[in-house]
């Protein structure tokens, strides 16, 4: 029975959709088991729990699966009614929050286009992102009466989760895009900038943000593939277009170039680690 009552989350560390659910569980103080999914080799359980879309995240509660991050967030709020509540009781206010949550998703999709394109297409995607950010800035000012929401143990709503998932790492996104591109301008977007700053100081948000070293590991995937041999691929451009595009842009950034060991040293180190691992297995 105890096993049945457990909460489990199937996700992946790089997914903002997974991070939304993790953040929701953590701010509610809900214990859960996390299962990291390899998106190039998805587990049989994931296919079983989400046979329609076969995607993460999937929350499993009382042995029953709930797919889709937006549905999961509402399920969590309706099942665990302790503070903080993600949606207000008033039907009109709740509708407004849902509307703007959907709009923030549109901001995320526009940003995604900017990462996955180049040249003129990328310029258009960045312009679309800026237009949507401008609309969001004015919309949030109107919704919250010109002052960024209070964020604490009693106040952490659906829009906090969405803004955190999409904009809390905007500086890293700006570095990857390069060319002085700014997603958030403190002067143009004072409300959103203040909100994001508050969110990034929240301890749960700090815990939930992917560490920089994981991105560095991704950026050296080609060296890892060479050591593994046999045609093994860690990143497939066809299967992982978003990650492949992101890593390609990261590797062109001057700071990443300076911070990444020379290719031959990475190869040597990985061969050394592989050799030592094999030795320890023999012993």
Image (spheres, grey):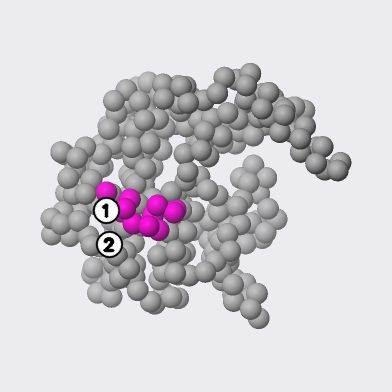
Q: Quick one: quadrant of the N terminus? A: bottom right
Residue 95 in which image quadrant: bottom left
How would you rate the neighbour count of disc 2 (Cα within 10 Å): few for under 14, some for 14-19, many for 20 or more?
some
Q: Which mark is residue 272?
A: none
Measured as percent of width and height from the top left, residue 55 is found at 57, 52
- Residue 125: percent from left, percent from top: 34, 32
Q: Check if mark 1's residue and mark 2's residue have beta carbons within 8 Å.
A: yes
Instruction: Kindly identify which residue carries mark 2.
Output: 151
**Residue 86 in view here:** yes
Q: Secondary structure at mark 2?
A: loop
Gap in angstroms between the C-alphas marked 1 and 2 = 7 Å
Give the percent coordinates (x, y) of residue 177.
Answer: 37, 29
At x 33%, y 50%, the residue is 200
- Where 39 sits versus 65, above or below? above
- What range of the chain is rendered magenta? 197-208
Tag 1 residue:
198
Please tell me whether residue 207 is drawn above or below residue 128 in the rendered image. Answer: below
- Determine whether the residue tagged by mark 1 lies in a helix, strand or loop: helix
Q: Residues within 10 Å of mark 1 (few under 14, many from 20)?
A: some
Question: In percent of the image, x 40 and y 52: which residue is there?
Answer: 206
Residue 26: quarter of image = bottom left
Q: Going from the N terminus, do you reach mark 1 or mark 2 first?
A: 2
């Amino acid at each position: 029975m105890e096993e049945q009552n457990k909460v489990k989350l199937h996700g992946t560390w790089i997914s903002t959709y997974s991070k939304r659910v993790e953040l929701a569980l953590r701010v509610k103080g809900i214990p859960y088991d996390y299962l990291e999914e390899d998106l190039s080799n998805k587990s049989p359980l994931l296919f079983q729990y989400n046979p329609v879309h076969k995607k993460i995240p999937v929350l499993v509660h009382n042995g029953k699966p709930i797919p889709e991050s937006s549905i999961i967030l509402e399920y969590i709020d309706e099942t665990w009614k302790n503070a903080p509540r993600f949606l207000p009781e008033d039907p009109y206010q709740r509708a407004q929050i849902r509307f703007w949550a959907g709009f923030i998703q549109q901001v995320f999709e526009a940003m995604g286009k900017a990462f996955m394109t180049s040249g003129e297409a990328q310029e258009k995607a960045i312009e679309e992102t800026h237009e949507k950010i401008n609309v969001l800035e004015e919309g949030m000012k109107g919704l919250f009466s010109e002052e960024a929401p209070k964020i604490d143990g009693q106040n952490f709503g659906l829009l906090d989760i969405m803004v955190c998932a999409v904009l809390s790492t905007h500086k890293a996104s700006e570095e990857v895009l390069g060319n002085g591109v700014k997603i958030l301008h403190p002067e143009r977007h004072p409300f959103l900038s203040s909100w994001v700053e508050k969110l990034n100081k929240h301890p749960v948000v700090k815990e939930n943000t992917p560490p920089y070293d994981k991105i560095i590991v991704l950026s050296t995937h080609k060296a890892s593939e060479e050591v593994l041999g046999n045609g093994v691929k860690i990143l497939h451009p066809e299967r992982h277009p978003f990650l492949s595009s992101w890593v390609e842009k990261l590797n062109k950034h001057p700071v990443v170039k300076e911070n990444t060991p020379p290719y031959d040293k990475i190869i040597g180190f990985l061969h050394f680690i592989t050799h030592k691992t094999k030795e320890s297995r023999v012993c």
